[in-house]
Amino acid sequence: MKSTFIFPLMLLLVTALTLRTIHKSWFSPGAFFPLLWFFFTIFPIIFAIEYPTPVFGIWVITAFSISIGVGSLLAVPGNNVWSNSSMLNTHSITEYSKTVQWGTAVTSFLSLIGIFFLIRYTIMKFQMDYSFFSFLAQILNQVNPLLFPIFLLVQLLL
């Protein structure tokens, strides 16, 4: 096994173990999902060495598992912000609002960084210059000539 797989796989396992201690059950979706994907990723890496496994795919699976785990924290018994009893108790709502705000801010920031690197990768792959017109020319080259009027109509409406 390559050493590049160790960190995302250990992060996936730590996420599963942490969520298991929070939810107190392996059958909770927040704990079950990362554990399942840990086994789905580690078995092919160990037993099917001849097939290449991209590390980026392991990181994507880890990121999705962590995001599902963070979302499952809203359903922790006793701290459920969606139940009627907790709607009356404003302390639990404000307690979760800071966590949700920080989680949203961090994931939004990471998404913007991802979009930036995707645009940068596209520019380098297609050897384009950094202008809006080169992006537009690339898009127009990819559009089927029969669908071009529909494409223009959609662009004008947006």
Image: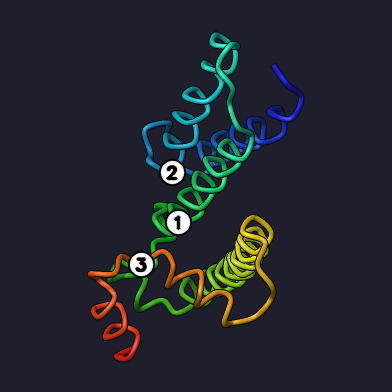
* Nearest to N terminus: mark 3 or mark 1: 1
State yes or no: discs 1 and 2 in contact (Cβ < 8 Å): yes
Closer to us: 51 or 97: 51
- Relative placement, left or right, of 58 versus 80 is right
State yes or no: discs 3 and 2 in contact (Cβ < 8 Å): no
Q: Position of residue 54 (x, y in %)?
A: 60, 32
* Residue drawn 26% across the image and 86% down it: 153
The C terminus - image quarter: bottom left
Q: How many angstroms separate mark 3 from mark 2 (CA)?
A: 41 Å
Task: Determine the image quadrant of residue 110.
Answer: bottom right
Task: Estimate how packed mark 2 is, as few (under 14), some (14 to 19) or many (20 or more) residues with alpha carbons within 10 Å.
Answer: many
Question: How many dots with numbers?
Answer: 3
Task: Determine the image quadrant of residue 88.
Answer: bottom left
Q: Position of residue 38 (x, y in %)?
A: 53, 28
Task: Estimate how packed mark 3 is, as few (under 14), some (14 to 19) or many (20 or more) residues with alpha carbons within 10 Å.
Answer: few
Q: Which mark is residue 30?
A: 2
Closer to us: 16 or 126: 126
Q: What residue would you read off at disc 1?
A: 71
Q: Residue 143 carries which label?
A: 3
* Residue drawn 52% across the image and 25% down it: 41
- Report the amino acid beneath label 2: Gly
- Report the amino acid beneath label 3: Val
Q: Which mark is residue 13?
A: none
Q: Vertical placement of 15 versus 113: above or below?
A: above
Q: How many angstroms separate mark 3 from mark 1 (CA)?
A: 38 Å
Q: What element carries label 3?
A: loop
Q: How many angstroms separate mark 1 from mark 2 (CA)?
A: 8 Å
